[in-house]
Amino acid sequence: MQTTLGSPTLSAIVSFLVIVAFTLAVTYWAARRTRSTREFYAAGRSISPFQNGLALAGDYMSAASFLGIAGLVALRGYDGMIYATGWLVGWPALMFLIAEPLRNLGKFTFADVVAFRLRQVPVRVAAAFGGILTLLFYVLAQMVGAGNLITLMFGLPYEWAVMIVGAVMLAYVLFGGMIATTWVQIIKAILLLFGVTLLTVLVLSRFHFSPGELYAAVAARYGQTALEPGGLVSDPIDAISLGLALMFGLLGLPHILMRFYTVPNARAARSSVLYATGLIGYFYLIIPIVGFGASALVGREIIRKVDSGGNMAAPLVAELLGGTPFLGFIAAVAFATILAVVAGLTLAGASALSHDIFTHAIRKGDATEHEQIRVARIATIVFGIVAVVLGMLFKGQNVAFMVGLAFAVAESGNFPALLLSIVWARFNTAGAVSSIVAGALTAVVLIVFSPTIWVDLLHHAAPVFPLRNPAIVSMPVGFLTGIIASFVAREPEAEARFHDEKLRTYLGIGAE
Amino acid sequence: MYDSPVPESHRSVLDSVEFRRLVAGRWRVSLALTALLFILYYGYIILIATNRQLVSRPVSGATTAGILIAAGVIGGAWVLTAAYVVWANRHYDPAVAELRARAEKH
């Protein structure tokens, strides 16, 4: 088939410009409502549960999950579906374990919760370290992915693509803070869900709206094995470890956790997770249909020729079924997806730098609103520039494992300290700091020694650590370190305050 | 984030049987649902690892059991989330409202 992929078509440029113009108009509107720290970090806690559900879905459904999973299903069949299910199962766990306590205890960042009854300076610094490390790995993967995808779809040079993403998302965050970022996420989530739904309907229309016929067509072309598990779960321990990372990594992602402060109360937080789970579940349910449709209608050979990773499967099937205009729309949606995710990451990074480090660790909580907002904006610029520079530095590198690294640090460094601080009276400053540092470092070191980096990137003969996903080891390290350190270094003040914390955790008394 | 010490009325709520029951009940429900989630998802992964034949079995035409199971895992995860919301709205919120009223009345 002929494709206009890789050349900037009129429809792609127009769709992209419309999306950017519209989101910048929203940012202008939001900027006039962003004066206080409460508005900058938490959208004035005025976001409704359904809006927050959409925004959470927007934060989570990255270009990697849209293009990547469709491509995985297109090229590797059923294994792509196994992978897709793993991306959803963190959401119920988030609901059961931390959503409501997080909302009741915190103000702007997850560090607020961990530091609630502990010594501010060490805990804030450790939590900001874990949070920023997570965000840097995540944003690096997004930026390099953005550069590659935009080059593939629009034919723009890589550096331009990275700069445009950096500049536009900085405009959102800098001027519109959380209000603009939330609305950008909502717009992007609606566009993405609409685009993928349309794509699914168009694919199914070729098969009399019967998924069974689609699967039969895939089996006829690539054999029944396309619909059977392949090599993804060949090692069950590694598969379970990946599952743990995806499930509990979500519970330590700062940009996701931050969204819970944008709703008025714990009940709204609860409803927003239900909406998000429904929207994200729907997304992962229909994405495989797009992937299978691409392999049946476009063919694996062509998909692989355009991009060996399969990332262009969804855009190619969009072009086949809806022509150049639809391809342009899908390309613009993918671009908007990247913009929105990077904006969310930048806002979370800025809040860790300004709220946790500047306001609480340096100023000990003594900073005026005006100063805090100013520092928040400076931190936004700093984080944004770092994101762009990282994107430039890692051009052409294989960064797919960076998302795994982000989830590993989140699930081993951030999540154990967060959960222990909510549920365990004895948990203290020593426990929190050592848990975050030990969990995060273990995750990073084990990934470096795993087949992913040690063998695939550094070309050693055998890995030092056998698993590709360290969660099954590094998460227990995070928990055990926190527990042992808490037992060794007692902190009676922190234990005494646990009772007051409980009133707020469960009843919301005194919640922001 | 710790500021003023809690007033005496709050302390009486903290020590009450109802509050302890609320907290214990909340974690009982949460942990039971988390256990079900683990069975659902890790059961699925272990099933693929240990019984490939079952997952690969065609159920109608080319459609394999695995495709339906994967859809079931996604649907099941949402149902568990919804179950928590229904429980919390029906049982947890009214109990919280009562205890809060008691804490603030004094």
Image: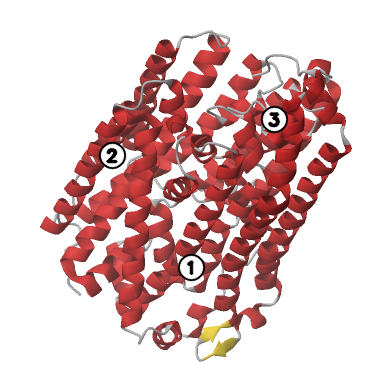
Which quadrant of the view contains residue A350?
top left
Q: Give the residue type at disc 3.
A: Arg
- Circle 2 sits in a helix, a strand or a loop, which is it? helix
What residue is shown with label 2? A165
Percent across and percent down for residue A377 are 36, 21
- Circle 3 sits in a helix, a strand or a loop, which is it? helix
Residue at position x 74%, y 39% from top? B98
Percent across and percent down for residue A502 are 75, 31
- Between A472 and A109, the residue placed more toward the observer is A109
How far, Cα to Cα, is label 3 from label 2? 40 Å
Task: Specify which label sits upstream in the sequence, 1 or 2.
Answer: 2
Q: Chain of mark 3?
A: A
| Residue A143 seen from this side | no
Circle number at residue A285 = 1
- Between A396 and A187, the residue placed more toward the observer is A187
Q: Residue furthest left?
A: A10
Task: Specify which label sits upstream in the sequence, 3 or 2.
Answer: 2
Q: Residues within 10 Å of mark 3 (few under 14, many from 20)?
A: some
Q: Are marks 3 and 1 on the same chain?
A: yes
What residue is shown with label 3? A504
Q: Chain of mark 1?
A: A
Q: Are marks 1 and 2 on the same chain?
A: yes
Which quadrant of the view contains residue A512?
top right
- Circle 1 sits in a helix, a strand or a loop, which is it? helix
Q: Are marks 3 and 1 in contact (CB under 8 Å)?
A: no
The colour style of the image is secondary structure
Percent across and percent down for residue A138 are 46, 40
Q: Residues within 10 Å of mark 1 (few under 14, many from 20)?
A: many
Q: Chain of mark 2?
A: A
